[in-house]
C-alpha cells in the first residue's frame, strides 16, 4: 500500500470514491447526491493554498484509489478519512493514519483532531490504536436527510515535538 499526496490528475477517481462512500450513508457527514463540482473546487483550493493536504492510498500504479485522507489546517489540523468498501480491513486505514500524522508533524502541528460517528466502531478502534483519544461528544451535531441528527465523537492525538 502506497500513500502519496493527491495530484490534480487524481481528482476524478477520488471524487468517484468519495461519492461511493457517501452513497453508503453511514460513514460520512455528506450524503448523496454529491455536488462533484463543489467538492472538486474545495479540494483544488486546499491543494493550492498549502493550508492542508489530500492524501491518496493506492494498491498499485493504475489501481483505483483504495482510500483517501483530507487534512485541513496546519496549526490544529482536522483529519477526515474514507476507505473504499472493497479495501477495508486491509491496512489502508493504518497507512492513511500514519501518513496523516506524519504530515501534521511536518507541518508543525502539536495535535491532530477528527470526528467519527459512534456507530463506526471499526474506525474508532483504528484511531485508538494509533493513539487518538475521545475528548468530546457532539450531541445531535450532524443533520441527516432522514430527519435524524447524529452524534459525533471528537478524538484527538497529541503529536508533541517531532
Image: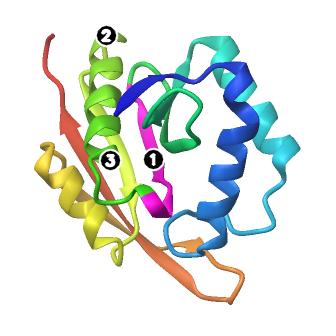
Residue position marked by numbered label 2 in the rendering: 106
| 7 horizontally vs 75: left or right | right
Task: Tell me how far mark 2 sits from mark 1, CA to CA.
Answer: 19 Å
Task: Tell me how far mark 3 sits from mark 2, CA to CA.
Answer: 20 Å
Residue position marked by numbered label 1 in the rendering: 81
Badge 1 marks a residue whose secondary structure is: strand
Q: Nearer the viewer, mark 3 or mark 2?
A: 3
Query: Which residue range is magenta in the image?
Result: 76-86
Task: Tell me how far mark 1 sits from mark 3, CA to CA.
Answer: 8 Å
| Residue 2 place in picture, x, y as percent | 38, 27
| Residue 128 place in picture, x, y as percent | 15, 53
Mark 3 neighbour class, 10 Å CA radius: few under 14, some 14 to 19, many 20 or more: many
Badge 2 marks a residue whose secondary structure is: helix
Does any portion of residue 139 appear in the rendered image? no
Nearest to N terminus: mark 2 or mark 1? 1
User: Residue 143 sits in which quadrant?
Assistant: bottom right
Q: Quadrant of the N terminus?
A: top left
Q: Which mark is residue 93?
A: 3
Amino acid at each position: 500500500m502506497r500513500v502519496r499526496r493527491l495530484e490534480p490528475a487524481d481528482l476524478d477517481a477520488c471524487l468517484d470514491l468519495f461519492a461511493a462512500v457517501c452513497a453508503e450513508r453511514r460513514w460520512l457527514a455528506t450524503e448523496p447526491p454529491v455536488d462533484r463540482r463543489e467538492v472538486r473546487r474545495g479540494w483544488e483550493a486546499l491543494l493550492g493554498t498549502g493550508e492542508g493536504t489530500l492524501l491518496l492510498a493506492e494498491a498499485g500504479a493504475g489501481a483505483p484509489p483504495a482510500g483517501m485522507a483530507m487534512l485541513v489546517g496546519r496549526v490544529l489540523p482536522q483529519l477526515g478519512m474514507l476507505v473504499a468498501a472493497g479495501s477495508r480491513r486491509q491496512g489502508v486505514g493504518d497507512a492513511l493514519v500514519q501518513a496523516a500524522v506524519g504530515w501534521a508533524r511536518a507541518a508543525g502541528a502539536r495535535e491532530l483532531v477528527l470526528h467519527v460517528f459512534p456507530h463506526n466502531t471499526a474506525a474508532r478502534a483504528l484511531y485508538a490504536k494509533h493513539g487518538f483519544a475521545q475528548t468530546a461528544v457532539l450531541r445531535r451535531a450532524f443533520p441527516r436527510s432522514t430527519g435524524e441528527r447524529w452524534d459525533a465523537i471528537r478524538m484527538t492525538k497529541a503529536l508533541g515535538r517531532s
